[in-house]
Image: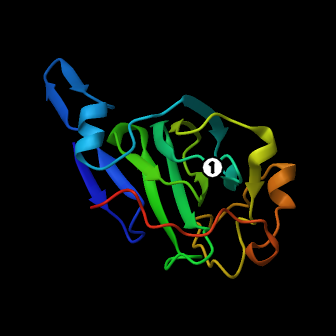
Amino acid sequence: MQVLDTSLSEVKLVRPKMHGDDRGWFAELFSTRAFAEHGLPTNFVQDNQSFSRRGVLRGLHFQLGNEQGKLVRAVAGHIWDVAVDLRPNSPQFGKWAGFHLKGEKLEYLWIPEGFGHGFVVLSETASVMYKVTNLYDPKAERAVRWNDPSLGIEWPIEGFEPQLSARDVVAPLVQDAELPAAYKEPAIRS
């Protein structure tokens, strides 16, 4: 398993090793031993999956008071996945990183607690699975505007208007949002 650094020091790209021959392939997608060896969390408590059509944009979502770290993977299709550091006082506050995740590539994106997360579907359809480190709590749901000018996220949406949920349409700008707890020294070390 490879764990690659990204432009956001705590966000990691995880590439499980594929073993293949003329019959097909096999990959170990999750192992507490491998994750621990790479300094990643090993206690995931819930698996989620979404299905979306081309142009659907979900996000930027995060949790407040019941923060969740997320291990995200496109199991089918192609998405542009974005992580944004939303922790006040973090040296990377307001910084974002985007990644093309495709079902056939077997890549995960690790997004720590305190980061906003969103994605847009670039293929006809996409199924996205993610493991989370804390159970879902609807009272903890928060969002910031996907196109907040202060973030300057470069969404690859040329040629179509993104389809948003009613909640995401009215999400506040970062400057007006209730944000996660102040930055703490990261537990994960590279």
Q: Is residue 39 left or right of residue 148?
A: left
Q: How many marks?
A: 1
Q: Secondary structure at mark 1?
A: loop
Q: Is residue 134 visible?
A: yes
Query: Residue at the spot x=82%, y=67% of the render?
Result: 172
Q: Nearer the viewer, residue 56 or 183?
A: 183
Q: Is residue 85 left or right of residue 62?
A: left
Quadrant where the C terminus is found in the figure: bottom left
Residue placed under numbered mark 1 in the picture: 67
Residue extending farthest to the left is: 21
At x 63%, y 77%, the residue is 151
Colour mode?
rainbow
| Vertical comparison of 149 with 124: above or below | below
Q: Position of residue 38 (x, y in %)?
A: 25, 48
Q: Please say if 158 is above or below 40.
A: below
Q: In percent of the image, x 44 and y 67: which residue is there?
A: 185
- Establish if 68 lies above or below 28: below
Answer with left or right where residue 15 lies relative to residue 92. Answer: left
Q: Residue furthest top?
A: 23
At x 75%, y 47%, the residue is 140
Which kind of residue does numbered mark 1 sit on? Glu
Q: Quadrant of residue 143?
A: bottom right
Q: Position of residue 20 (x, y in %)?
A: 15, 27
Q: Residue 11's spot in the image, x, y percent?
A: 42, 60
| Quadrant in which the N terminus is drawn | top left
In the drawing, does residue 73 fall left or right of residue 182? left
Q: Does residue 163 appear anywhere in the picture? A: no
Q: Nearer the viewer, residue 190 or 13?
A: 190
Q: Residues within 10 Å of mark 1 (few under 14, many from 20)?
A: many
